[in-house]
């Protein structure tokens, strides 16, 4: 684990010290299929283990079902389905990210939560500058510095409202 990372998969919730950058913003990193994505930390109300999901007949394909969380019924959007990744059953590392959608919260089902990233505005390539097909949930891509092999880490910065939108 590098400095400034939150070891959410290992069970620790202590943020390691890192030099404080006034221009950096915090993003919650997560995995869906082979993609590494991140949402602004203030767009995520809660991260929770996946409770039992009840399927909803005739729901749109991206809706995995509903869950009961803190006494409320919450719609679960499967990000594997939204992002057209293969659809295996949820594993032990899967989590739901509670994000606001209109007047209620929606649970985004992800394969795992990785860490808290600190991203400076200068480290972001905006989606409009990226080649390829438009993906409405993509805000941009962040360059987070080199990994052990020297290659830069790239994380897709996503728009929580676009991911939570029902078809």
Image: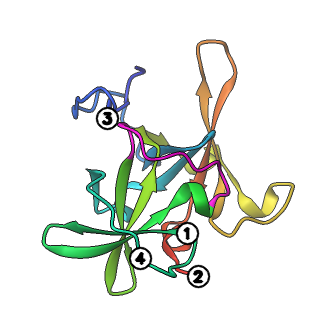
Whichever of labels 4 and 2 marks the residue nearer the N terminus, that label is: 4
Tell me if residue 13 comes above or below residue 137 in the rendering: above
- x%, y% of residue 123? 62, 43
**Of labels 4 and 1, the one closer to you:** 4
Which residue has dot 3 on it?
Answer: 8
Whichever of labels 4 and 1 marks the residue nearer the N terminus, that label is: 4
Circles 2 and 1: CB atoms closer than 8 Å: yes
Cα gap from disc 4 to disc 2, whole angstroms: 15 Å
Q: Along the horizontal axis of the image, is 120 left or right of 28?
A: right
Who is closer to the viewer here, 137 or 107?
A: 107
Cα gap from disc 3 to disc 4, whole angstroms: 30 Å
Q: Residues within 10 Å of mark 1 (few under 14, many from 20)?
A: some
Which residue has dot 2 on it?
Answer: 167
Which residue has dot 4 on it?
Answer: 56
Whichever of labels 2 and 1 marks the residue nearer the N terminus, that label is: 1
The verdict on residue 80 being magenta is no
Which residue has dot 1 on it?
Answer: 62
Cα gap from disc 2 to disc 3, whole angstroms: 31 Å
Circles 3 and 4: CB atoms closer than 8 Å: no
Whichever of labels 1 and 3 marks the residue nearer the N terminus, that label is: 3
Q: Image point 32% across, 29% down: which residue? A: 7
Q: Image point 34% across, 31% down: which residue? A: 9
Q: Image point 70% across, 21% down: which residue? A: 151
Whichever of labels 2 and 3 marks the residue nearer the N terminus, that label is: 3
Point out the stretch of residues depicted in magenta. 83-94
**Of labels 3 and 4, the one closer to you:** 4
**Of labels 4 and 2, the one closer to you:** 4
Colour convention of the picture: rainbow
């Amino acid at each position: 684990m590098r400095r400034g990372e939150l070891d959410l998969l290992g069970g620790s919730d202590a943020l390691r010290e890192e030099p404080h950058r006034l221009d950096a913003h915090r993003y919650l990193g997560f995995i869906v299929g082979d993609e590494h994505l991140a949402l602004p930390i203030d767009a995520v109300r809660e991260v929770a283990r996946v409770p039992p999901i009840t399927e909803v007949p005739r729901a749109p394909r991206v809706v995995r079902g509903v869950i009961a969380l803190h006494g409320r019924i919450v719609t679960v959007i499967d990000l594997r389905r939204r992002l057209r990744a293969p659809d295996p059953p949820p594993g032990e590392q899967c989590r739901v990210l509670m994000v606001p959608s209109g007047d209620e919260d929606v649970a985004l089902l992800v394969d795992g939560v990785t860490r808290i990233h600190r991203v400076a505005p200068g480290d972001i390539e905006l989606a409009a500058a990226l080649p390829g097909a438009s993906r409405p949930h993509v805000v941009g891509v962040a360059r987070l510095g080199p990994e052990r092999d020297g290659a830069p880490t790239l994380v897709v910065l996503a728009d929580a409202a676009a991911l939570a939108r029902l078809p």
